[in-house]
Amino acid sequence: SAEMVLVAEAVVAEAARTVVGFATAQVQSSICYNGTWAELVEIYVEPASRRSGVGRALVSEIEVITKRRGARSLFLRTNQMNLDGRSFFQHCGMVEVPKTVFEKSL
């Protein structure tokens, strides 16, 4: 039988036994599309821990985990107005690509 597979992953960053950041991702595959891919769903770093490498370490760990799960690519969605976030993701080696997104309020 055909099915779509979705696996959720999460990583946490700690400093001095305190959580200072986290990231979550979903690994997906589908019968309609070739391959497996991952989506970085959430990433957050406490303001005091930003620009210290915590965010990059979180993304790097998500990359390792999702690649191990078979993902060939990692994507994310962010608001066009999120200039700091967009700059950070580019710093992590991600490339902004055009996408068509449809949305419906429920």
Image (tube, rainbow, N blue to C red):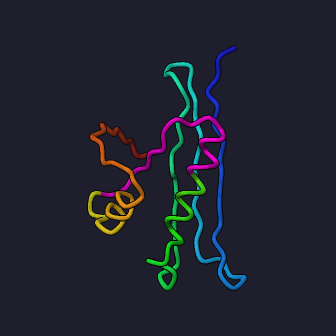
* Residue 100 magenta-highlighted: no
Quadrant of residue 5 in the image? top right
Q: Is residue 30 left or right of residue 51?
A: right
Range covered by the magenta-colored residues: 63-79
Along the line of sight, the residue nearer the viewer: 61 or 3:
61
In this view, the residue in front, 67 or 98, is: 67
64 versus 88 height, above or below: above
x, y (%) of residue 29? 58, 29
Looking at the image, residue 56 lies above or below residue 16: above
- In the rendered image, residue 73 lying in the magenta stretch gets the answer yes
Q: Is residue 89 left or right of residue 70?
A: left
Q: Position of residue 90 (x, y in %)?
A: 34, 57
At a point 65% along the width and 51% down the height, the residue shown is 9
Q: Quadrant of the N terminus?
A: top right
Q: Position of residue 30 (x, y in %)?
A: 56, 25
> Is 20 placed above or below 98 here?
below
